[in-house]
Amino acid sequence: MQYRSIIRILGLLIAIFSISMVPPAFVAYWYKDGAGVPFMLSFVLSLVIGFFIWYPNRRYKAELKVRDGFLIVVLFWIVLGAVGAIPFMLAGNPHLNLAGAMFEAFSGLTTTGATVLTGIEFLPKAILYYRQQLQWLGGMGIIVLAVAILPMLGVGGMQLYRAETPGPVKDNKMTPRIADTAKHLWYIYLALTLSCMLAFYLAGMSWFDAICHAFSTVAIGGFSTYDASIGHFQSPLINSICVIFLLLSAVNFPLHFAAIRGKSVSTYFRDPEFKAFLVIQAALIFICFAVLLHTNVYSNSADALNHAAFQAVSISTTAGFATDGFAAWPLFLPILLIFSSFIGGCAGSTGGGLKVVRVVLLFLQGSRELNRLIHPRAVYAIKLGRRAVPDRIVEAVWGFFAAYALVFVVTMLLLLLTGLDNITAFTATAACLNNLGPGLGEVAANFGSIPDTAKWILIIAMVFGRLEVFTLLVLFTPAFWKD
């Protein structure tokens, strides 16, 4: 293990991340909200920390192995989450303790969208902007940005990319050079953000709200500048724009690249994961609409359809935005939507959850086992579209599912141990492990009232979810640390 090289890279990344403290300071200056000093102090402090980590190790430039990449990614998210909490701790408004500040920072960076804050609209604009910016940076994965920058600093990025990129097949690259791949991902990400920002502004948001909500929409984060979330605007048009960009952001980004390069929309419909994703979304919207219509929750069918489509897409893609208190809907729907968040978005998207392709493979494998019971000697191949999936990938997906379930159960039991009730513990675990945000019970509105111990447990769950379990879990195996 190249420890000195890893420490050197970590110092560089912290120094780079310090730049993210500068835009909120400018926002504070523009709005004269008095929150600029904490961000400038945070900028200096994080830059100094990065420098003192990097400087003693600046000459160590050994070639990274895959194991080194895993360790860097895990350390990077943990350290950046801690550094990202500094402004929350230095700011006078909001006044957060260590657990609250860390929870808010990790929730932003992992795009979970769970918050400990109330009265959000009364916070300084700089704090509001910073929360949204954390989600935007975390949405595509800061590591992917680092992959584009690190080659210029003399560090190869392939190992980092393998450790960070979501999905069951890690080695597929859109372009031969990994830095080019990362850049293309960011071009698409930036284009979606700018388009979403403009659409929100034209639909009636202020520029500040449009920028902030575009950040969290494309990142599928869920933070808002208002306690009422998107529901604050009371606009079906804004709801519809948000749904469109959530769906676009939940699609595999390399698939976007392939469609743009091939200049053909049909590229999407040749992808089996995309088709499965659309079917799932359509089914959820229809079920929500039908139940809301049947139970007369809204006065007319147009309102019912608008809220059904928004909440179904928002929760199932793991964004967690709200237009209404969906916890007050007939209990069947909140529970259904919480379970839908386990599916999440497509692999290679900014969404959380298990990912659609894994769920499809689990379903196909289950079908194959049923067929084998009837025809034990028959040979069945699992196919995604026209391509046969190697058994090694199917086994990896089953292993991932087992690990995901194990982490979920352990996290939920630990939350129950802190005194949370059943519904709160279950939905809080789902909300943080799936990087969803809102839950039910005590965490339906925010996570501020739960014990600090529970907050620390959920921070770990967020990191597990963001790094897709295996990346973090592999560090706990003895084989990882053996040469």
Image (tube, helix red, strand yellow):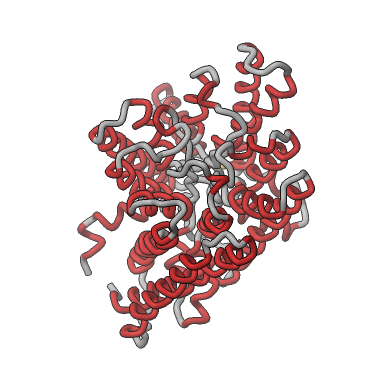
- Residue 327's spot in the image, x, y percent? 51, 25
Return the residue nearer the eye: 441 or 305. Answer: 441
- Residue 210's spot in the image, x, y percent? 69, 51
Quadrant of the rendered structure where residue 191 is? bottom right
- Residue 153's spot in the image, x, y percent? 48, 81
Q: Is residue 428 above or below residue 333?
A: below
Give the residue displayed 57% in from the left and 39% down from the top.
Answer: 321
Q: Is residue 424 above or below residue 37?
A: above
Q: Is residue 117 above or below residue 178?
A: above
Return the residue nearer the eye: 251 or 234. Answer: 234
Return the residue nearer the eye: 16 or 102. Answer: 102
Give the residue displayed 22% in from the left and 69% down from the top.
Answer: 483
Quadrant of the rendered structure where residue 383 is? top right
Tell which residue pokes out farthest to the bottom in this image.
59
- Whether residue 240 appears in this view of the structure is yes
Horizontal placement of 166 versus 7: left or right?
right
- Residue 459's spot in the image, x, y percent? 36, 48
Quadrant, the N terminus:
bottom left
Horizontal placement of 112 versus 267: left or right?
left
